Amino acid sequence: MSSRRKSGAYGDAPERMRDVLRGALRGALDRLPEAERVMAAWTVACGPQMAERARPVEFAAGVLTVETADVAWRRELAGMRERLRAELGRIAGVAVTDIIIVLPASARKPKTSR
């Protein structure tokens, strides 16, 4: 019976591969303007499942605006904001100072005046 732990030779392989892919992406992104680098790094930083429900719409002056599908995903992203900022900076090589999370116009409730 093998006593190989999951964090052994095979358990670390996905994390090492992820690091290799991030490095390769970083090299390819270096030729793009900052805003495009951040936008392109989004899916890698947050993962494909989240990228399906949240998309970057603007990057200006270090602030990334992300549009998310609904309030639940907005809350999920808000909890990951700092990790995503750091990951985007690492992958894109751009300082992301803040992430603003918005809902699509169709999901926003109109304000009523009283």
Image (tube, rainbow, N blue to C red):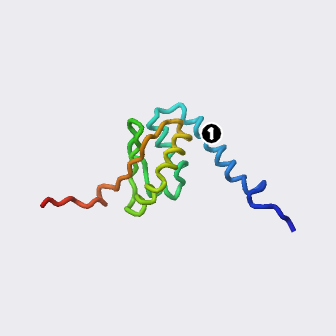
Q: How far across and how far down the image is residue 65, in percent? A: 38, 46
Figure check: 79 above or below 64: below
Give the crowd class for mark 1: few <14, some 14-19, many >=20 residues within 10 Å.
few
Q: Nearer the viewer, residue 42 or 98?
A: 98
Q: Which quadrant is home to the C terminus? A: bottom left
Q: Residue at x 49, y 36 (%)?
A: 94
Residue 82 x/y as whole percent: 49, 49
- Residue 53 placed where, x, y %? 44, 58
Q: Locate the N terminus and report the quarter of the image it occupies.
A: bottom right
Residue sitting farthest toward the bottom:
1
State the image quarter where residue 58 is shown: top left
Q: Amino acid at mark 1?
A: Ala
Residue at 39% x, 35% y is: 61
Report helix, strand or loop for mark 1: helix
Q: Is 56 placed left or right of 20 in the picture?
A: left
The number of discs equals: 1
Residue under the image location 50 percent in, 43 percent down: 40
Q: Position of residue 42 (x, y in %)?
A: 49, 47
Q: Residue at x 64, y 48 (%)?
A: 18
Q: Is residue 42 left or right of residue 105?
A: right
Compare residues 58 and 62 and report the one nearer the observer.
Answer: 62
Furthest residue toward right: 1
Q: Which residue is mark 1?
A: 24
